[in-house]
Image (cartoon, helix red, strand yellow):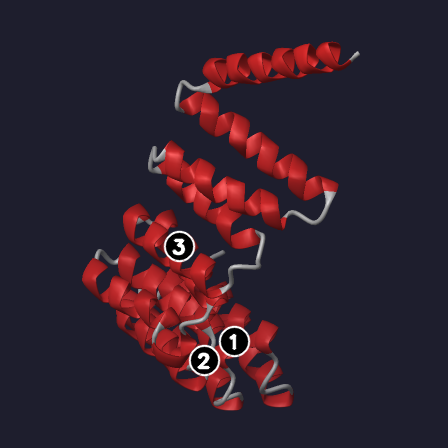
C-alpha cells in the first residue's frame, strides 16, 4: 500500500473514532496503521501511534489490564520508556495482584535490566503478600528465567506455610530435580504422596519418583530393594502356613 493509501486509511480510522471514541479494537488498529505509513519519519509515526493508543488508557484510567495491553503495544513498537511507564502504572493500580509485577519484571529482564527485574519480581511475595500461593508463583517465575536456586528457596517456604497442600511439595520436587538434587526431590515426593487425595495425584507422584530415581541412577537399586522386600514378605507368609 502506497503512502497516500495509508493516509486515507488513517483518515478513515480518525472519522470512525469520532463516532466510537473508546473502541479498543479500532484504536489499536489505527495506531498500527500509522506505524506502517512510511511517508512519515519513524519518530513521528511512533509518537502519533502512541498518542492514539494512550486514548485507551485515558478512557479507562483505573484499569490495570488496559494499561498492560497498551504497554504491550508500545513494547511491540520498541518504545521501551512508554511501555515501562504503563507496566508500572498497572502495578500501582493493582498493588496486591502479582501478575502485573510479573509482566513488568519480565520486560525489564528482556531489556537486560536484571537487577531491576529481580527487585520487581521479589515484590510479588513481600510483606503481606508473602503467601504460599504468591511464593509458589514467584518460584515459578524465577526458575523460568534461570534463577533456579532462589526459586527453590521460595517454593520450600510455600511448602512450610501450607503444609497440607499437595501441589507445593510436588512443585518443589520438580524444581529440585531440575537442580539435580534428586534426594531432596524424593523427600518432597514423600510428602506429596502423604497429601495425595486421588488416584491421579498418586500416579503423578509415582511418575516423578521414577524419573528422579532414573536421573539419580538409583532406579535399579530401588527395584532390587523392592524385589528383596517382596521375597522376604513371601517367605514370612510361607512360614506362617
Q: Is residue 112 left or right of residue 189?
A: left
| Crowding at mark 3 (Cα within 10 Å: few <14, some 14-19, many 20+) | many
Give me the disc on residue 65.
1
- In the image, is residue 25 above or below residue 136? below
Image location (x, y in percent) of residue 92: 38, 84
Q: Is residue 151 left or right of residue 60?
A: left
Q: Residue at x 65, y 47 (%)?
A: 196
Label 1 close to label 3 by CB (< 8 Å): no
Image location (x, y in percent) of residue 226: 57, 18
Callout 3: SS: helix
Q: Earlier in the sequence, mark 2 or mark 1?
A: 1
Label 2 sits on residue:
96
Give me the disc on residue 108.
none
Label 3 sits on residue:
156
Q: Residue at x 47, y 89 (%)?
A: 58
Q: Is residue 11 left or right of residue 78?
A: right
- In the image, is residue 55 above or below residue 165? below
Distance CA(mark 2)–CA(mark 1): 14 Å
Report which quarter residue 106 is drawn in: bottom left
Q: Residue at x 42, y 79 (%)?
A: 90
Label 2 close to label 1 by CB (< 8 Å): no
Give the camera-side residue of 35 and 116: 116
Give the camera-side residue of 55 and 200: 200
Give the camera-side residue of 155 and 39: 155
Distance CA(mark 2)–CA(mark 3): 22 Å
Callout 2: SS: loop
- In the image, is residue 96 above or below residue 170? below
Q: Earlier in the sequence, mark 2 or mark 3?
A: 2
Q: Earlier in the sequence, mark 1 or mark 3?
A: 1
- In the image, is residue 45 above or below residue 203? below
Closest to the camera, between mark 1 and mark 3, is 3
Amino acid at each position: 500500500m502506497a503512502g497516500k493509501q495509508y493516509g486515507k486509511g488513517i483518515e478513515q480510522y480518525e472519522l470512525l473514532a469520532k463516532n466510537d471514541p473508546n473502541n479498543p479494537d479500532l484504536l489499536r488498529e489505527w495506531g498500527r496503521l500509522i506505524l506502517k505509513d512510511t511517508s512519515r519519519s519513524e519518530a513521528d509515526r511512533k509518537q502519533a501511534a502512541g498518542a492514539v493508543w494512550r486514548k485507551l488508557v485515558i478512557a479507562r484510567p483505573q484499569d490495570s489490564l488496559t494499561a498492560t495491553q497498551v504497554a504491550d503495544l508500545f513494547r511491540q513498537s520498541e518504545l521501551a520508556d512508554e511501555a515501562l511507564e504503563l507496566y508500572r502504572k498497572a502495578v500501582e493500580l493493582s498493588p496486591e495482584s502479582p501478575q502485573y509485577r510479573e509482566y513488568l519484571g519480565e520486560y525489564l529482564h528482556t531489556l537486560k535490566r536484571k537487577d531491576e527485574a529481580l527487585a520487581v519480581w521479589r515484590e510479588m511475595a513481600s510483606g503481606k503478600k508473602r503467601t504460599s500461593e504468591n511464593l509458589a508463583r514467584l518460584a515459578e517465575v524465577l526458575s523460568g528465567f534461570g534463577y533456579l536456586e532462589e526459586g527453590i528457596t521460595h517454593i520450600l517456604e510455600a511448602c512450610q506455610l501450607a503444609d497440607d497442600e499437595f501441589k507445593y511439595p510436588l512443585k518443589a520436587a520438580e524444581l529440585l530435580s531440575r537442580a539435580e538434587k534428586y534426594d531432596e526431590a524424593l523427600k518432597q515426593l514423600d510428602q506429596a504422596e502423604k497429601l495425595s487425595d486421588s488416584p491421579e495425584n498418586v500416579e503423578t507422584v509415582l511418575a516423578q519418583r521414577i524419573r528422579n530415581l532414573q536421573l539419580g541412577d538409583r532406579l535399579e537399586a530401588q527395584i532390587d530393594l523392592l524385589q528383596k522386600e517382596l521375597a522376604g514378605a513371601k517367605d514370612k507368609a510361607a512360614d506362617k502356613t
